[in-house]
Amino acid sequence: MNPEKKTKLKKRLTIAGISIVAVLLILSISGYLFIRSYIKKMNLVNLDEPNNISDQEELYIDEDDLEPEPEDIIEDIPDSTQEEIETVEDMIRHNMEDNQTPMISDKDVTNILLIGCDTRKKGGSGRSDAMIIVSINKKTKTITATSILRDVYLQIPGKRNNRINAAHAMGGAGLLLDTIKQNFKIEVDRFATVDFYAFIDIVDAVGGVTLDVDTDKEVRVINNYIKELNRLTGKDETLDQLPGPGTYHLNGKQTLGYVRNRYVGSDFARTARQREVLEKVFNGVKGLGLTEINDLMNVILPQVTTNLTEGEIFSIILSLPSYAGYELQQMSIPIKGSYENLRINKMAVLGIDFEKNIKEMQRVIYNVE
């Protein structure tokens, strides 16, 4: 090949290379802007900065004004014995004062607390009806979902001992994070929260879910929740009521009544129902087309509040392909054989063995024996 042809070929290759780089750059920028447009729809907060939603104290409830939960009013059952109450109070005090159990953290582990809030007023603060710590361990290539039952009785920093779900009502996500960190000695600084209304929108967006409602008691409980939501939204209280036991394709409002039901079976059964519905919703999302997913994101993301930064969200999104190969595992706190059912101040609570539960969380999440 003569020098002139070589020069022309080299020039063409250079132009082609520049063109490829330009196309890749355009695609990267477009992808960045596309993802960023979704992230911007979310409510991003910084718990360390003043004047954000986490510092708006009017959203929170003073512990003396915290209304009892419905089951605490309905059930006329005496409190546990003074000896039983003193024993669990001593366990809580010992756990909070025990410096022999250090806070555990690992640069390869990311913990994000998912909060399902039971506020009746859109945009307000309420008890945390669902609390799930999602732990991504890059070292062991595992993703762990740890459910914390709402009735766990512990110390809420700066407040009196109470159920863990009261922390969110009294101080939002910041106080709930501090409560988990100080009681369970686990470093978790990130959260994402949604309320009842976001859950309803998600289920409706996937076209509802098919579930078995087996007993008349379940129907009554679900219908009571539906009636409450209808009343809060100014609708006919009889709208969407279930006629009796059976297999139904439930809409978002009906499904919310199904997952909130804690009067049939224990709170363990309720969290099992939550996992069942989450799986069905996940499968429903997988069947959506691009246009439907876009519509879903436009409805849901503005209802999500998180202190994850834009950079952290980008990192999670970009890592999703690798996370698909991670092992998924679940656990519930308290673990089996580590708790007892008690009644304190008319509340049904779980008195737990903190040492056993902390050790199990460290073993499963951090692979620490």
Image (spheres, grey):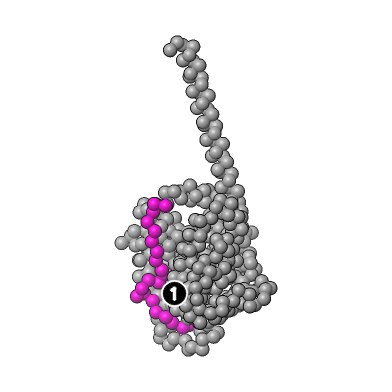
Q: Badge 1 local density, few (<14 within 10 Å), some, or many (20+)?
A: some
Of 206 and 153, nearer the camera is 206
Q: The C terminus is located in which quarter?
A: bottom left
- Please tell me which residue is depicted at 48% across the width and 68% down the height of the picture: 274
On screen, residue 196 versus residue 360, left or right, reads: right
**Picture coordinates of residue 336 (x, y %)?**
36, 73
Mark 1 secondary-structure assignment: helix
Residue furthest right in the image: 234
State the residue position of label 1.
269
Q: Is residue 126 above or below residue 78?
A: above
- Please tell me which residue is depicted at 43% across the width and 62% down the height of the picture: 145
Whether residue 104 is visible here, answered yes or no, is no
**Picture coordinates of residue 301 (x, y %)?**
59, 57
Q: Is residue 348 magenta?
A: no
- Please tell me which residue is depicted at 43% across the width and 12% down the height of the picture: 1
Residue span colored magenta? 324-345
Q: Is residue 331 magenta?
A: yes
- Please tell me which residue is depicted at 58% across the width and 46% down the height of the picture: 34
Of 106 and 328, nearer the camera is 328
On screen, residue 356 versus residue 112, left or right, reads: left
The quarter of the picture where residue 136 lies is: bottom left
On screen, residue 189 versus residue 139, left or right, reads: right
On screen, residue 52 versus residue 79, left or right, reads: right
Look at label 1 and name its amino acid.
Answer: Ala
The quarter of the picture where residue 185 lies is: bottom left
